[in-house]
Amino acid sequence: MEITYEVLAALLDAYAYEIVFVDRTHTVRYLNKTAKERYGERVIIGNSLFNCHNESTRPKIEEFLRRADAGENEMFETYNTKTGEREFFVPVRDSAGKVIGYFERHEVPWTKEEASVPVGEYWKRRVTQQ
């Protein structure tokens, strides 16, 4: 089997967490199925990330990119008190190791009682509670 764009997109769509890939110009280049469901029309491919993120986050993101360029990988961003999620900045590198973009990874807050709940079901519950 050849690994094509369609295969990679299907693989990322099977991933239950949202992936919003943003390039170095802060332009949204890819959303997986979960991201499309979670963010709807708030995040659109081809638009600036700052259409959905406050412009005041730009210095923070630029600092993460500087650190990534210096060799750091996934970096803790914040604990989101509204959702209970830990958020991480994840640089994406090309085959030469150059940072070509990034995405934000969210960790959902699990309890022992929820441990067997699939992530997709967790997100559906979260969306209906908001």
Image: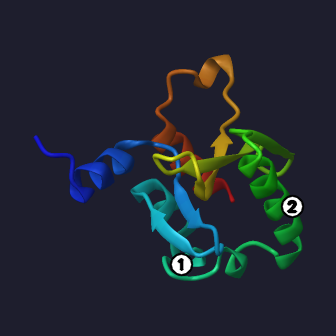
* Quarter of the C terminus within the rendering: bottom right
Along the viewing direction, whichever of 122 and 25 lies nearer the viewer? 25
Q: How many marks?
A: 2
Quarter of the image holding residue 59? bottom right
- Image coordinates of residue 96 in percent, x first then y, are 51, 47
Along the viewing direction, whichever of 59 and 117 lies nearer the viewer? 59
* Circle 2 Cα neighbour tier, 10 Å, few/some/many (<14 / 14–19 / ≥20): few
Name the residue carrying label 2.
60
Quarter of the image holding residue 39? bottom right
Name the residue carrying label 1.
41
At x 38% / y 48%, what residue is drawn? 12
Rendered position, 43 above or below 30: below
Say whether residue 6 is left or right of residue 73. left
Mark 2 or mark 1: whose residue is earlier in sequence: 1
Q: CA distance from mark 2 to mark 1?
A: 24 Å
Task: Look at the numbered discs 2 and 1 and tell me whether their residues touch, using CB distance below 8 Å.
Answer: no
Say whether residue 80 is left or right of residue 2. right
Say whether residue 107 is left or right of residue 35. right
Q: Is residue 85 visible?
A: no
At x 80% / y 55%, what residue is drawn? 66
Of the residues shown, which amino acid type is indicated by label 2? Lys
At x 57% / y 82%, what residue is drawn? 47
